[in-house]
Image: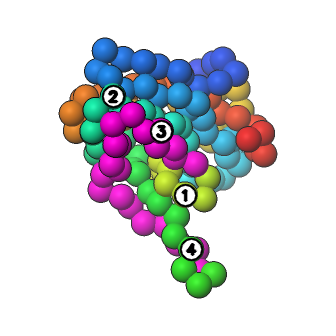
């Protein structure tokens, strides 16, 4: 469980030399038997870029992917997103009920107060690892 550790009260607020800022990284706690989780954040790029992939350590989840929630005629579903456009200077927020990072095949429950390291892969800026704070259910 090396990627889960006690952390601060909020996720990373990181600004890199690559021109990408990532703020408010968080994940809701999951029940012990859950095999999926989610990560939410806001990203702003100084130049046009794309979020092309995400990952977490295998001791946290089997895989991580960018997902979006679709509501068509009252039917809610999710689908993977190959890449997320990041227009220069605009905030792009991944949030509940919309685009988010899906953690599939959780190896351990996500426990409030712990953290999860998430690597974001940008087409231009390259990889960036951020830390998501796990929050209590309903805390956000």
Location of the C terminus (image quadrant): top right
Residue 22, percent across and down? 46, 28
Mark number displayed over residue 46: 2
Q: Is residue 93 a member of the stretch shown in magenta?
A: yes
Q: Separation of disc 1 and disc 3 at Cα? A: 15 Å
Q: Are marks 1 and 3 in contact (CB under 8 Å)?
A: no
Real-space Cα separation, disc 4 to disc 3, in angstroms: 23 Å
Residue beneath disc 4: 71
Residue for badge 3: 91
Prevalent SS, magenta region = strand
Q: Earlier in the sequence, mark 1 or mark 4?
A: 4
User: What's drawn in magenta, residue-wise?
Assistant: 75-95
Q: CA distance from mark 2 to mark 1?
A: 23 Å
- Please state the horizontal and vertical placement of residue 61, each as a whole percent of the image: 46, 43
Name the residue tied to disc 1. Answer: 98
Say whether residue 88 is magenta. yes
Kindly state the secondary structure of the residue where label 1 is placed.
loop
Instruction: Kindly report which numbered mark, 4 or 2, lies closer to the viewer in this rendering.
Output: 2
């Amino acid at each position: 469980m090396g990627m889960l550790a006690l952390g601060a009260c909020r996720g990373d607020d990181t600004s890199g030399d690559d021109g990408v800022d990532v703020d408010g990284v968080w994940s809701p706690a999951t029940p012990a038997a859950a095999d999926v989780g989610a990560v939410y954040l806001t990203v702003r790029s100084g130049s046009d870029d794309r979020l092309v992939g995400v990952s977490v350590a295998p001791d946290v989840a089997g895989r991580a992917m960018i997902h979006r929630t679709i509501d068509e005629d009252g039917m809610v579903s999710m689908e993977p997103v190959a890449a997320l456009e990041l227009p220069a200077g605009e905030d792009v927020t991944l949030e509940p009920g919309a685009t988010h990072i899906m953690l599939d095949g959780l190896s351990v429950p996500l426990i409030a107060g712990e953290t999860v390291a998430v690597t974001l892969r940008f087409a231009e800026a390259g990889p960036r690892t951020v830390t998501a704070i796990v929050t209590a259910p309903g805390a956000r």
